[in-house]
Image: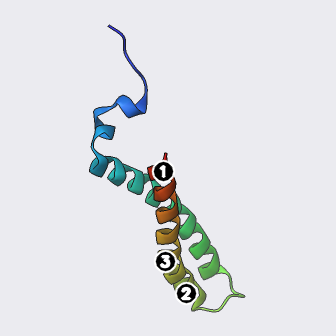
């Protein structure tokens, strides 16, 4: 019996909806850690205005969608 270790052979990756969900979850986890760190830096910096963390979070919502669409298009082209 030959065992394949390729992720693409896993039953999880045979369903496009599940594959997209897993990819999106991994993307949001990594991106979320970065956003929290930057927001914490802005919030605890006494030289920055108090509204800067809120503006940064609003910007990050739109920026993350843009990044995810670009990554998704690259993955769909392969």
Task: Identify the residue under disc 2.
Answer: 55
Residue occupying image coordinates x 55% and y 69%: 35
- Please tell me whether mark 3 or mark 2 is closer to you in this view: 3
Where's the N terminus, which quadrant? top left
Marks 3 and 2, the one that precedes in the sequence: 2
> Which of 60 and 42 lies nearest the eye of the viewer?
60
- Please tell me whether mark 3 or mark 1 is closer to you in this view: 1
Residue occupying image coordinates x 45% and y 60%: 28
Q: How is the image coloured?
A: rainbow
Q: Is residue 76 above or below residue 55?
A: above
Residue occupying image coordinates x 64% and y 92%: 49
> Which of 20 and 42 lies nearest the eye of the viewer?
20
Label 3–label 1 contact, CB within 8 A? no
Q: Which mark is residue 62?
A: 3
Q: Residues within 10 Å of mark 1 (few under 14, many from 20)?
A: few
Residue 46 picture location, percent across and down: 69, 86
Q: Which mark is residue 77?
A: 1
Q: Is residue 26 above or below residue 39?
A: above
């Amino acid at each position: 019996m030959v065992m394949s270790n390729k992720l693409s052979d896993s039953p999880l990756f045979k369903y496009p909806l599940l594959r997209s969900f897993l990819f999106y979850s991994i993307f949001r986890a990594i991106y979320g850690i970065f956003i929290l760190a930057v927001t914490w830096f802005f919030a605890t910096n006494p030289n920055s205005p108090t509204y800067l963390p809120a503006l940064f979070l609003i910007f990050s919502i739109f920026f993350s969608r843009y990044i995810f669409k670009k990554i998704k298009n690259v993955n769909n082209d392969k």
